[in-house]
Amino acid sequence: MEIIGVIVAGIIIGLLGKFVAPGDRDNIPLWLTVLCGIGGVLIGYYVAAALGVEATAGIDWVRWIVSIVVAAVLVVIAATVTGRSRTRSV
C-alpha cells in the first residue's frame, strides 16, 4: 500500500468509524479520528487476512467492513481515553 492511499483511506474509514461508533463520539479531534482510521485500515487488513479473506481483483468489501469496525472500536477507545469533556465548570 502506498502511504498516500493509506492516509486517504484512513480519513474515509476514520469518519465512517466515527459515524458507526455508538453514542456521541464527536468529542475527539479530527486528527485523532484520522489516526483511528489509519489504524483501522492497517489492523483491519491484517485481521481480515487472519480470518481467511483473500485478496481479489475487485473491491474487497469484507476487508473494508472489517476496517470500519476496527476503526469504530478505535474511535470508541480514543473517545473514552482522551475525549474532551462537554461540561463546563463554574
Image: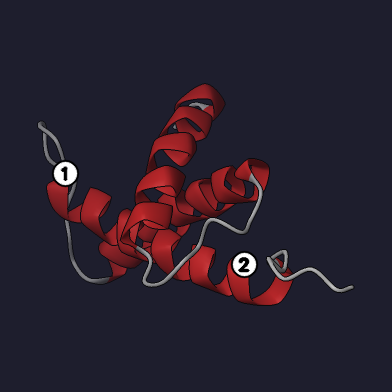
Farthest residue, direction front? 90
The disc placed on residue 78 is 2
Residue at position x 12%, y 40% in the image = 56
Nearer-the-camera pick, 39 or 58: 39
Q: Nearer the viewer, mark 2 or mark 1?
A: 2
Question: Could you tell me the amino acid type at mark 1?
Answer: Asp
Q: Secondary structure at mark 2?
A: helix
Q: Position of residue 12 (x, y in %)?
A: 39, 37
Residue placed at 52% from the left, 46% from the top?
38
Query: In this rendering, would 63 be left or right of 11?
Result: left
Give the vertical position of 73 relative to 6 (above or below). Answer: below
How packed mark 1 is, by other alpha carbons closer than 10 Å (few <14, some 14-19, many 20 or more), is some
Q: CA distance from mark 2 to mark 1?
A: 27 Å
Which residue is labeled 1 in the image? 60
Residue 45 appears in the figure = no
- N-terminal of the pair, mark 2 or mark 1, is 1
Which of 66/46 is in front? Answer: 66
- Residue occupying the point 43% across, 55% down: 18
Q: Which kind of residue does numbered mark 2 sit on?
A: Ala
Q: Residues within 10 Å of mark 2 (few under 14, many from 20)?
A: some
Eyeballing the image, is 57 above or below 89? Answer: above
Could you tell me which quadrant the N terminus lies in? top left
Total residue callouts: 2
- Which quadrant does the C terminus fall into? bottom right
21 w.r.t. 14: above or below? below
Specify whether 9 is left or right of 64.
right
Q: Quadrant of residue 71?
A: bottom left
Report the residue at 63% width, 56% height from top. Answer: 28
Query: How has the structure been colored for display?
Result: secondary structure
Q: In front here: 42 or 80?
A: 80
Q: Where does the image place residue 22, in percent across and percent down from the top left?
A: 36, 71
